[in-house]
Amino acid sequence: MSISASTTSPASKAPALRWFAMLLLCAAYIQGPVTKILDFGSAIAEMNHFGLSPAPLFAVLVIVFELVTSAMILTGRWRWLAALCLAGFTLVATFIALRFWELPPGQDRMMATNAFFEHLGLIGGFLLVALDDLARPRGADS
């Protein structure tokens, strides 16, 4: 079933709700960098833990990347590109940080498995944001 571009969706009638949904989708990508800024030593330790070197450079790059792409999504500036970037970033980070298949059976494996698939859901959400943005007529509500 195809929906024509002229069909008015409930989301297009509620731009504040649409924006709030994007804020929720970006929440981890706003909270994470703020936490890293407030405890930069732990941010460096996290980069070292995942073998990213030089750790301070990677920590700064992650902070800037997550804040800038989140701002792009929330402001509507190149939203589709930011959503695709966050989808790709999340995919790579998921395979670096949540290799549940390497863990022995037990609670840690179960939690990593759940987090892995939750991250796949985030990726799907960002892909939907990108597709929605590309399908919107330019100048439509942000």
Image: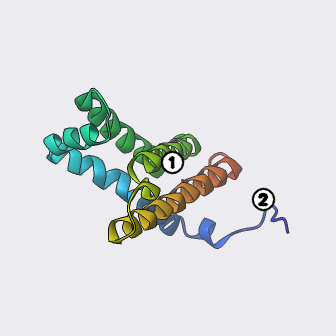
Helix, strand or loop status at disc 1: helix
Helix, strand or loop status at disc 2: loop
Residue at 27% x, 33% y is 60
Q: Residue flagged by tag 2: what amino acid is it? A: Ala
Q: Quadrant of residue 68?
A: top left
Q: Report the residue marked by disc 2.
A: 5
Q: Quadrant of residue 79?
A: top right
Q: Residue flagged by tag 1: what amino acid is it? A: Leu
Q: Quadrant of residue 47?
A: top left
- Work out whether residue 14 or residue 101 is closer to the camera in this orientation and state it: 101
Judged from this view, the residue extending furthest toward the front is: 104
Where is residue 142 drawn, in percent x and y?
54, 53
Where is residue 35 drawn, in percent x and y?
21, 51
Nearest to N terminus: mark 2 or mark 1: 2
Q: Callout 2 environment at 10 Å: few (<14), some (14 to 19), or many (20+)?
A: few
Where is residue 92 drawn, in percent x and y?
48, 43
35 lies left or right of 129: left
Q: Report the residue marked by disc 1.
A: 91
Position of residue 4 relative to residue 30, above or below, is below
